[in-house]
Amino acid sequence: MIKILAFIMLIGGAVALVMGVLGIFGNIALMFSPWALAILGFVFFVSGISMLKYRKDTDEVAAEHRH
C-alpha cells in the first residue's frame, strides 16, 4: 500500500513539476500560480522517490511479524 501511494506521489509530482516549469517560462497558461505548482511538484516528487527507496511495504512488514 505504501509503495502504491509513493508511486502516485511520484507521478503526480513529476507532472506538476513539468507543468509548473513550463508555466514559469511562459510556454503554457495555467489557472494556478506556476511557482506554487513547481514547488509542490518538486516536494511531491522528492517525497515519492524517498518513500519508494526507504519504506518497507505494509505486506513486507506483516510477513516479518508472522515469522
Image (cartoon, rainbow, N blue to C red):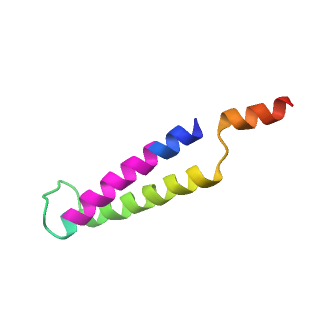
- The answer to whether 6 is drawn above or below residue 14 in the figure is above
In the rendered view, does 29 fall on the left or right side of 58?
A: left
Name which residue lies at 38% across and 59% down: 40
Residue 4, given in percent of the width and then of the height, sits at: 51, 38
Residue depicted at 44% across the width and 50% down the height = 10
Quadrant of the rendering where the C terminus is positioned? top right
Query: Is residue 12 depicted above or below 65 in this figure?
Result: below
Q: Residue furthest right?
A: 67
Q: Position of residue 62 (x, y in %)?
A: 75, 32
Q: Who's the residue at 64% across and 54% down the image?
A: 54
Asked if residue 55 is among those painted magenta in the image, a careful observer would answer: no
Asked whether, in this view, residue 66 is left or right of residue 49, the answer is right
- The image quadrant where one finds the N terminus is top right
- The percent position of residue 31, horizontal first and vertical second, equals 17, 53
| The quadrant where residue 28 appears | bottom left
For residue 14, side relative to residue 19 (left or right): right
The magenta region covers 8-22
Check if residue 12 falls in the magenta segment: yes
Horizontal side of residue 47 vs 22, given as left or right: right
Q: Position of residue 23 (x, y in %)?
A: 19, 63
Prevailing secondary structure class for the magenta stretch in the rendered image? helix
Residue occupying image coordinates x 44% and y 57%: 45
